[in-house]
Amino acid sequence: MDQQEIETSGLSRRHFIQGASSVALAAGIFSSSSLNALAASVPGKKGGSLKVGVVGDVKDLLDAHWIVAIPDIVRLNVGFETLMVYDENFKPTYKDGLAEEVSTKDGINWIIRLKKGIEFHDGKTLTADDLVYSWQRLSNPAEKHSKALRPFLNPAGVSKVDNRTAKLTLLQANADFMVTLATYTSTVVPVGYQNYAKSPLQIGTGPYKLKSFTPGVESTHVRHKNYWDSGKPYLDEVRVLSFSDTTALTNALQGGQIDVAINVPLATLPTLKKNKKLDVYSNSAGKITPICLVIDMDPFKDVRTRQALKMLINRKNLIKQVLSGNGRLANDDYSPADPNYNSNKYPMQEQDATGALELLSAAGFSKSKPVVFDLKAPDDDAALSGLAKAFVEQVNTASGGVVKATATTVASGYWDTTYMAPGVNAFMTYYNPKPYFPQFSGMIFSYPETHFPEPGSNIKDLYAKALGEVNPKKRAAMVAKMQKEEHERGGYIIPYFVNAADSYSNKVKGINKRNSALPLDYYGMHFKNIWLDK
Amino acid sequence: MPILKFIARRLGLGVLTIFAVSVLIFLVTQAFPSDPAQAILGRETTPEALDALRQELGLYRPAVTQFGAWFFDILQGDIGKSFVTQLPLSDYIAPRVGNSLFLMLVSAVFSIPISIAVGAFSALRRDQTFDKVSSTTSLVLAAVPEFVMGTGLILLLSTSVFQILPAITLIDAGQKPWSDISGMVLPVLTLILAVTPYVSRTMRASMIEMLESDYVEMARLKGMSERTVLLRHALPNALGPVFQVIALNLAYLAGGTVIVERLFNFPGIGSALADSVRARDLPAIQFLTLMIAGVYVLMNLLADVATVIATPRLRTSLK
C-alpha cells in the first residue's frame, strides 16, 4: 500500500503517520515523527546561502503579526518567533518557543514566563516589557490583525509581573488559549516595533535578521549570531525570492537556481518526484477547500438540500480528479489533528443518489423544478476552481437532472468582488490546518461564509462554554454537540483534506518531515534546523 | 528643412495620440471590478478601514479631478507613489526599465542583423534550398506562441534534457541587468526566435520586389557589378518597409514581453505591468501603459523618419 492509498483509504491518522515512513514500518516500534526528529537533531554543516522560492508580487509585505499571502508567512517566520509551537498533533509545546512556562488556574488569568538569555537581533535582551508590548500590539482593536483575538483580549488585559514574566487577563475564560500562543502570527517583538512599511528595521528574536527587502523581488536574511538555541542556525543567510507564477518557480527548482520551492502545484508532483536531485514533502495536516452554501439563501434554506448535495458527491473520485490523489477523505468535518475530531464517530458519507433524491423530492425539487445555483471560484488557485467544476459535474450527473448547477471561475478580483458578497449563495474558500476551536471561530465570527448557525441555535454559547471548560471530558461532550449541529445542519461541503506540497534540492538537510500547520515543519523551524550538504 | 517639418508634425500627432491613450487607460482602470483599497486590504478588512484608505488614496474625488491631478503631475515629471507599497513609483519602475531596455537591446542586436541577412540572402537564393529551409523555419517559428517556445527551450536546455542554462533570470534588487548573463540567454533566445521570422520575411519580400524592379534591371544593364547593384541600389530601398516592422518589434520588445518576462521571472516592465494589474495599483498601471504607448509612438516616428531618409523618392517628395 503506498502513501496515496493509505491517504485515500480512510485509515486513521495514526496509521497514516506510521505509513508515511517505510523505515518506521520496518522498525515497528518507532513512530516516523520520532525518527524524523532524530534525523533533524544530527548536527548540520555550517555556512551557505539557502535560496527559497515562493510565488509573490509587489503586494508582499513584512509585519511580525500580519500576513496576506504565502511570501509574507515565509518572511515572518524567518525573523520572528512565538511563545509556543504546535507539535505534529497540534498540541502547543515549549521546545521551539520563547516561553519557559505558561500556566493558568481559571482559564482567565494566564501567566507567561520567558526563557532566559534570549537576545533580539540588535543585542537587546528579551524581557517582559517586550512581551507586554507585543500582546498589546496583537490585541490593539485599531489594528486589523487583532480580529480573532478581540473577543478574548484587549490591551488593558496585558500586564508585567516581573522582568521575565507577564500576565494576560482574558475577557472570557479560554482553556484553549495556548493554541493562540502557538499561532504563528502571535510573535514576540521588541518595544516600539513597527512593520516594514513604517520602519525597515525589522528586529525579532528569530535565527535570521533582515538585511534587505524588495516587495515582489526578494528579501535577504543573515544569521543572528547570538541566537538562543545553541549551535543554530547553520546557514549564513536565507534568501526568499518572489516568483510571478508556479511555472517559473518549479522551473527554477528543477534548473537548480533555487534550493526550496514553497507550495508547488499538486499536478507537478509526479515530475518532481522523478527528479533524483529533488525531494518532495507532502504534508497532510488538514488543509481544507470548502464549498460554501449560504444557509439563509435559496435553494439552501431547506436543510434537506444541503444534506442531499453532501450525499450526491463521490469523495474518492474528487480526490483522484482534482488532487491527482494527493489528499484524504473528509466528511464535511475539519481539523483532523484535533483530539476532538469527529467526536460523534460519523461513518464516511458514501455517494447515495437514491437517498439524496428522496430528500430533494421531499424538499419540493424535481426535474421540472430543479435545484439551480452557480458555484463561484477564484482563478488563482486550481485546487478551488477544479473542485468547483468537478463538484458541479458530479451533483448534476448523480441527481439525473434534479440539480442543475453551474461553476463560474471569476477571472480577477474574486476575493474582493465575489467571495462572501451579498447575493452570492455558493462559493469556494480555503483554510490552512488549524485545531478545532480557532477554525470554528474563524468560520463563525471572522468569516461567516455560510451564515451558520440558524436562528435559535445555541452553538455560539456552547462554544464560549466549551472554551472556558478546563475538564477535557466535559469539554469533549460540548464539542460533540457542536459538531453534531455543524454536521447535520451546516453549509460547508468538505469532501477531502488537501495535501500541501513543497519540494527542495536533496542538498537541503535537517527538515523534520512531520505534519505541521506551515510548510516544511514551520519552514525548518524558522530555517534554524536547515543546513546545506555540499 | 522639409524633413524637420515632417518630424515636428509627426511629434505633434504623437503627443495627441499619447493623450488619447492616457484618457483611455484612465477610463479602463475606472472600470475594474474592484477598487485598489479593497485589493490592498484583502479579504480580512473592515468597512471603516476601507473607507479610510479610499479617502487617503483620493478615490472619492470625481474621475475628472483624479485624471486631471494625475496628468498634471506626470507633466511635471512626478509619476507618483504606488498605492500598494506607498513608495515612490520611480524607485520601483526605474530599475525595471533598465532591465527591459537591456533585454530589448541584446535581443535587437542579435535579431535585427540576423533577420536582415537571412531575409536578403533568401531573396537572392529565391526558391533554392536555403530559401525553402529558412521560409519554412520562419513560418513555423512565427506560428509557435512565445510561451511554448520558451517552455520548450527551458525543457531542452535547463530542466529536462540538458541542464546547461538557468531556467530563470535572477537579477537582484540594486544589481545591474548584466549581473546574470547566463540567466539572460534563454529569454533573449526566446525573443530572438519570436522576432526574427517577421523581420526576415518582410525583408525577403521587400528585397525580391526590389530585385525585380526596373532600376535594378537598369543598373545591371549599365554593367555595374552585382555587389554594387545589391548594396547600393537594392538593399537601401528594400530596407524602407523593413524599418516599420523592426520598429514595431522593438516597441513590442520594450513593453509587450509580459509572457516572456513572467516565464523567466525577469524583473522587467512587462512583469511589473502584470503585477500592478493584479494588485490594482492604479498609478503604476497608468504610468506603465503610458510609457509603453510612448515607446510605440516614438518607435513609429523613428521608423517613418528612417524610411523617408532611406528612400530617395520619399525624401524628395517632402515639402
Image (cartoon, helix red, strand yellow):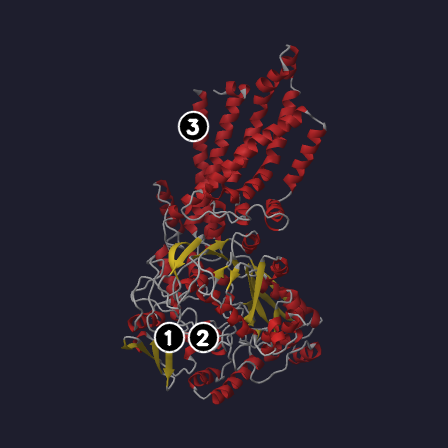
- What amino acid type should be assigned to the residue bearing mark 3? Ala
Q: Mark 3 points at which residue?
A: B8
- The percent position of residue A247, horizontal first and vertical second, equals 57, 54
Q: Quadrant of residue B39?
A: bottom left
Q: As shown in the figure, which amino acid type bears the numbered disc 2?
A: Phe
In the rendered image, which quarter is residue A503 located in? Answer: bottom right
- Sequence-wise, the earlier of marks 2 and 1 is 1
Q: How many labels, in total?
A: 3
Above or below, A197 against A230 in this view is above
- From what the image shows, is residue B299 above or below residue B125? below
Relative to A431, say whether A472 is above or below. below
Of badges 2 and 1, nearer the viewer stands: 1
The answer to which of A361 and A534 lies nearer the viewer is A534
Question: In this rendering, which labeled residue sits more in front, label 2 or label 3?
Answer: 2
Q: Residue at x 67, y 33 (%)?
A: B134
For discs 1 and 3, the disc positioned in front in the rendered view: 1
Identify the residue at image location x=57%, y=40%: B189
Q: Distance between the residues labelled 2 and 3?
A: 65 Å
Mark 2: which secondary structure?
A: helix
Please report the residue visible at 52 percent of the width from the left and 36 percent of the height from the top. Answer: B250
Secondary structure of the residue carrying tag 1 is strand
Residue bearing mark 1: A99
- In the rendered structure, the answer to whether residue A276 lies left or right of residue A223 reads right
User: Gap between marks 1 and 3, in whole Å?
Assistant: 73 Å
Give the chain letter at badge 3: B
Binning the other alpha carbons within 10 Å of mark 1 as few (below 14), some (14 to 19) or many (20 upward) gives many
Q: Mark 2 falls within which chain?
A: A
Residue on which the image places disc 2: A445
SS of the residue at dot 3?
helix
**Residue A302 visible, this angle:** no
